[in-house]
Amino acid sequence: MPEPPADSAGPVAANPSFEVQLQLPKSLEGRKRIIDVDLTRSGWYVPRLDDELISGPMRGEVGIAFEGERVLFGGVSYVPLSVASAKAQTTEKNLRDWIKKQVAFNGKLIQTTTIPFTGRKLYVSEDSVRRMAERFVRWPSNEPAGAILLGSTKDKTGYISTPEAAALLGISARTMWLWASRGNAPIHKPLDVIRCTTSDHFYIREDNVRELKRLLPRAGVHRGRRPQQALRL
């Protein structure tokens, strides 16, 4: 059994040994083994496996399996924070803020962990990623939006923010927000709008914005003026 490192916190509890089955990533192939881990009273230990450092909280019998970007740890599937933010269609900063502020999605907090062999990198459970991705609703019905893509896409079916739409149309962000939220845009059909239930931001389908752009004067819409072409609809 390995000796605890000199900087290990606290004395080792009586009879603390347990086994951890590790399935290592490709960079460590050929080094899979059963190892003995000493558990301190604080629940933290940093043993060494050849040149690789195992770090993180290990309590009881824990299985770790690396499958591409996915990690199965303690019976839960996790992905790195960067992958989680991309799948949830938000920024890493927003995701960190949600975790810090304990923002709930569908009634549950975001589940995170750190994984041994990853340098204390933060991982997010795939169940949490799914719940975050489902935060969008149709406006004004508030029905689930289903699978959507934020941002510009080749087929123009992505949803862009009201400031982005306003810049594209040459109008003020407030005017675009009013058109999206009140459904009074100068177009012959309601805009396809979704709302983020976490931020309350609105997003408009890009092909709708492109169609609206064809109806507006090139100089844009100014205060107190509605485009003549739209008024004739």
Image (cartoon, rainbow, N blue to C red):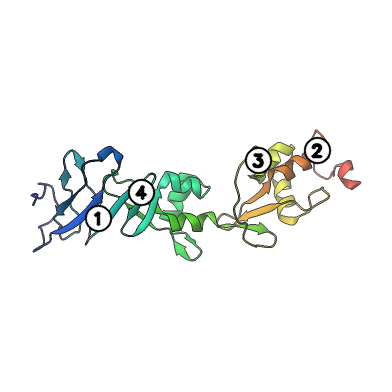
Where residue 75 appears, x then y in whole percent? 33, 60
Q: What residue sits 82% from the left and 48% below the top?
A: 187
Mark nearest the camera among 3 and 1 is 1
Considering only order in the chain, which callout, 1 or 3, is on the residue closer to the N terminus?
Answer: 1
Give the farthest residue toward the front: 30
- Disc 2: CA contacts within 10 A as few (<14), some (14-19) or many (>=20): few
Where residue 42 appears, x then y in whole percent? 18, 59
Q: Secondary structure at mark 2?
A: helix
In the image, 214: left or right of 120?
right
* Front position in the image: 147 or 197: 147
Q: Amino acid at mark 4?
A: Leu
Cα–Cα span, label 3 and label 1: 44 Å
Where residue 50 appears, x then y in whole percent? 16, 40
Q: Which mark is residue 214?
A: 2
Considering only order in the chain, which callout, 1 or 2, is on the residue closer to the N terminus?
Answer: 1
Cα–Cα span, label 2 and label 1: 58 Å
* Front position in the image: 51 or 109: 51
Residue that numbered label 3 is attached to: 164
Considering only order in the chain, which callout, 2 or 3, is on the residue closer to the N terminus?
Answer: 3
Where residue 178 appears, x then y in whole percent? 73, 51
